[in-house]
Amino acid sequence: MGIDYEQLVRGDRIHASLLHDPEAFADEMERIFVNGWVFVGHESEIKEHGDWVTRQLGTESVIMVRESDGSVKVLSNRCSHRGTALCWEQRGNDTSFQCTYHNWRFGLDGSVRAIPFPDGYDTPKEELDLDAAKRLETHRGFVFVNLDGSAGPLADHLGAAGYELIDRLCDLSPTGEIDLSKGWIAHRVQSNWKLWPESDSDGYHVGFVHASMSETTDTYYDEVAVGGEAVRRSRAIDYGKGHIELDWRPSYQRQLAWLGTTRDKVDSYCEALTERTGTESAEQMLWDGPPHAFLFPNLFLGELVIAIVEPVGPGEMIHRHTSVQFQGVSEDFNRRLLRQTEAAVGPASFITSDDAITAERIQAGISGTQRSWADQDRGWIDLSRGLHREQIDETGVRSSDASDETTNRGFWHRYLELMTGQVSA
Amino acid sequence: MTSLQLKAEVEGFLYREARLADEFQLDEWEALLTDDFHYWVPAGRLEGDPAEQLGYLNDNRARIATRIRQLKTGKRLSQLPVSPMRRTISNIEVVDQDDGTISVKANFVIYEIAAQSTGELRIWPGQAQYRLRRVDGSLRMSSKWVELVTAELGQRNLTFLI
């Protein structure tokens, strides 16, 4: 008898036991991270043939590698013989992967190439290849996989909104290309992974959790997310499929607010952008900036930061981030983005370190809740904020004040669909 | 000044710096800094150009001032309450003296209680590299670079002065 997810995920609340239950965690690793589409990394991380990086997709360790034909492949980081991890560093460059146990060797495409004393095997060779992601698709360098191949095309998962959010970020680069090869910083947090899609897309907490930052330094978050007026102008949006955005665009009071600078300081960037996209388009983009959005289940587009939510266990996760770097800009410009990233995100940052504490406090608060309490009206987490004023457009997109829990409900709605296998229209 | 006298003065400085950091005596700690102070904790070894890397922190003088101001608001959740912590410093070596700048390396271990959330004991081993110089007769710190043994593994919250 498995978990009755419909009983625990309601339209206006979810049961707190889902944030620490080991059985729910195991279900999620299978139904969301193996059966569904997940973000792996960016093609700019593996520029040369043989470049590889390791990554965690839920609890599955994978290798993302650039093949000799230039294509990208995602392989399980597990020898097909006895299961030994093949790569234990974060990145490298190789012409093949060799297991250190019995020296089995695999091509970059995961096919078995050499087995010592091969006459001991009568097994068809292809049965000894590494497990690979059954489906892999990319969009503007963002690599997504569906490990078991059961999820249908990426377009069904991302939808028009998912593509548009990635496009809105990449289009800000003067060449239309971004680079994510500055390395990833891991922030280890003692909380359930699902608290971070919620935190990253929660517009309600900014003025409270981050008050110390607002009081200390000028930040555009004051303009878009702090105080009653800002949270009424900015929008919380649920595009469906669990893809959600805090849309700051209506709140920006000037161009380039999202970059924390003014035009005269980044003149050549503005010119380069105009040259590629035309004046009208560039002027608008300089107002709009990059999105603040979460693509289900593990990719955070945090303006000029990209983060991956990595589940480790029911009460342990990693928030792994890197800095967006533009192509076709000065060294100084990209350095500005590095420093902006360090200020905003990570264990020593001015912002998300306080989100980490909040997530850990939630984890402490909910860790005793029991699934059986659901029908005793105990242990619920309320997500009803703004339900009465949420708007739905003709395409089904829901939006509301930025402080409303439209985004959180969007995440959990998709969660329920995937956990029950019942996708509603 | 003999090398033993210098070593004693440097050790005195490092111990004081460590105690002020452990005790969150933020103004007194900040008074140890020169106007061009640079504070760096990379996500790897202490090598390469800090400006080109994404680190845990990379503060110029203005940013460390902001960091201290944020801690002093009384609203910095990740240090509310501040972490009870103590560090030991050892293996202190004066590695270079050049144009009035004294380069020092030392090992440290910090024991921290995450009093703000889980209450667990966190242990932070590493090496600190300092550049010191004399301002108005007393030593000040113009840089502190910290290489964590765990640098490549990721970190829990690092919102105290390391």
Image: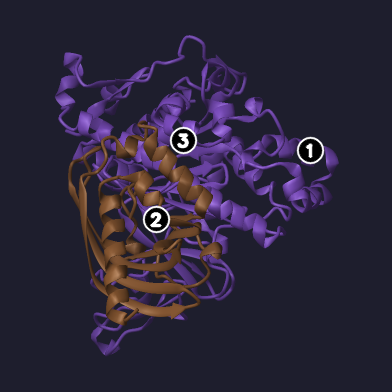
Chain colours: A purple, B brown
Given the image, what chain letter belongs to the residue carrying mark 3? A
* B7 horizontally vs A327: left or right: left
Q: Position of residue A220 (x, y in %)?
A: 58, 34
Q: Nearer the viewer, mark 2 or mark 3?
A: 2
Q: Which residue is mark 2?
A: B32
Q: Nearer the viewer, mark 1 or mark 2?
A: 2
Amino acid type of disc 2?
A: Leu
Q: Which residue is mark 1?
A: A283
- In this view, the residue in front, B91 or A103, is B91
Given the image, what chain letter belongs to the residue carrying mark 1? A
Q: Report how far apart the C-alphas of labels 2 and 3 lie in the structure.
A: 24 Å
Amino acid type of disc 1?
A: Glu
Given the image, what chain letter belongs to the residue carrying mark 2? B
Q: Quadrant of residue A237?
A: top right
Q: Which residue is mark 3?
A: A213
Q: Position of residue A24 (x, y in %)?
A: 24, 37
Q: Nearer the viewer, mark 1 or mark 3?
A: 3
Q: Position of residue A259 (x, y in %)?
A: 63, 43
